Image: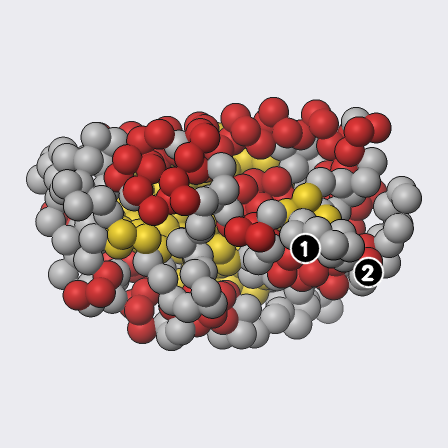
Amino acid sequence: MIIDQLNEPVPGSSLLSTPTGDAYTDPTIFEREQAEIFEKMWNCVMREDSLATAGEWKTITIGREEIIVVRTRKSGIRAYYNVCRHRGMRVCTSGEGKNKTLQCGYHAWTYALEGDLVAAPNLTSMPDVDRKEYGLKPVHVRTWLGYVWISLADDPPSFDETVLGEVKTRFGDVESIDNYGVENLKCGESKTYDVQANWKLIIENFMECYHCATIHPELTEVIPEFADGLASQRKNGEVHGASFGDDIQGFTVDGSSGVSSLPAIAPGQDRKYYAITVKPQVFINTVPDHVIIHRMFPVSESRTIVVCDWLFQPQVIDEGMEIANSVELFHRVNQQDFEACEQTQPSMSSKAYDHGGALVPSEHHIEEFHQWWAARLGGNVPVPA
Ligand code: FES
Ligand SMILES: [Fe+2]
């Protein structure tokens, strides 16, 4: 069996097949995913305000590369491979810091925040060395929704067609997410989950709600329609937000009221939950009074770090308003989802899963994700028959 034949309908059945188990366990497939997906597409890596002042930097791993993200004095946020152009030592050897320049700890080659080589022992005796050419190798950077997005591709895919395209597909336009003013929100809580599961299991889980009635008691209380198993991401192909239950006051763990609604949301966005999957590693969840954003960082074929941020209007955070009940709802959802993914991962290498699993009709839209994944990998990844 090859990936080209994914999701063939089982004859006479309402089920579609999934990729075979080794798509979730084979290190060589994971390496191809790193090369063809994470090192080529746009990755949402950190909040812009986590680099508040010039000279602040953080390192982040994307695919198989370590990247320095730094706020410069005049050029906004820039990003570079964390590789010294002299003999290759990591320039930044810890996760974050603040410096006027970036200096390698081996032979002291020193780079401006804008990347140029500005100093090195005996550099003046080597006037032929071009300081730009021997500067840190840059990668492409964008900012959107108050986050830094990075692509390692020499020629990155169109941000409009890929990232914004996912929003258009979900909402029918980009303006609908603009209403939430996400770039002006402040992070009230951030949690990091170390999930022992393949990143694709986490995406597939996020895309369906067939599991909601079983594992998400609090969520289905707040959004009763989720108990029917239909994901809010689509309903009969139309833009659909999942409605709060009649007696529910807010998107909180006990249905009590949250904080006041974001000022510019449309009437149709009130008392509704929307979810968007931005492939390959972002989930955006919107509710009337806050926005929840997940960023995934695959570590191996069986381990994924997920960072989840809860974003509120700045005054909510600055004035110390109550957000614990809001945070707790999706924190529980995250724990429930990730536990399910972790309980699934070991079975991916079982003989019983050699031929993969099945998608029921309310999960059939996950086929699009599988086809996208197969296409990114060239459509001919061998998997056992
Ligand atoms: S390897 Fe960085 S200065 Fe030599
Ligand atoms: Fe879930």
Across and down, in percent, residue 131 comes to 63, 65
Is residue 153 placed above or below 33 in the rendered structure?
below
The residue under label 1 is which amino acid type?
Answer: His
Q: Nearer the viewer, residue 130 or 351?
A: 351
| Callout 1 secondary element | helix
Q: Quadrant of residue 64?
A: top right
The C terminus sits in image quarter: top right
| Callout 2 secondary element | helix
Is residue 180 placed above or below 298 in the rendered structure?
below
Residue sitting farthest toward the front: 12
The residue under label 2 is which amino acid type?
Answer: Asp
Identify which residue is drawn at 27% across, 52% down.
243
The residue carrying mark 1 is: 370
Residue 307 visible, this orientation = yes
The residue carrying mark 2 is: 4
Q: Nearer the viewer, residue 135 or 211?
A: 211
Across and down, in percent, residue 367 comes to 64, 57
Q: Quadrant of residue 77?
A: bottom left
Identify which residue is drawn at 62% across, 60% down.
368
Figure quarter occupied by ligand 2: top left
On residue 167, the disc is none
Q: Nearer the viewer, residue 172 or 42?
A: 172
Is residue 239 placed above or below 359 in the rendered structure?
below
Q: Residues within 10 Å of mark 1 (few under 14, many from 20)?
A: some
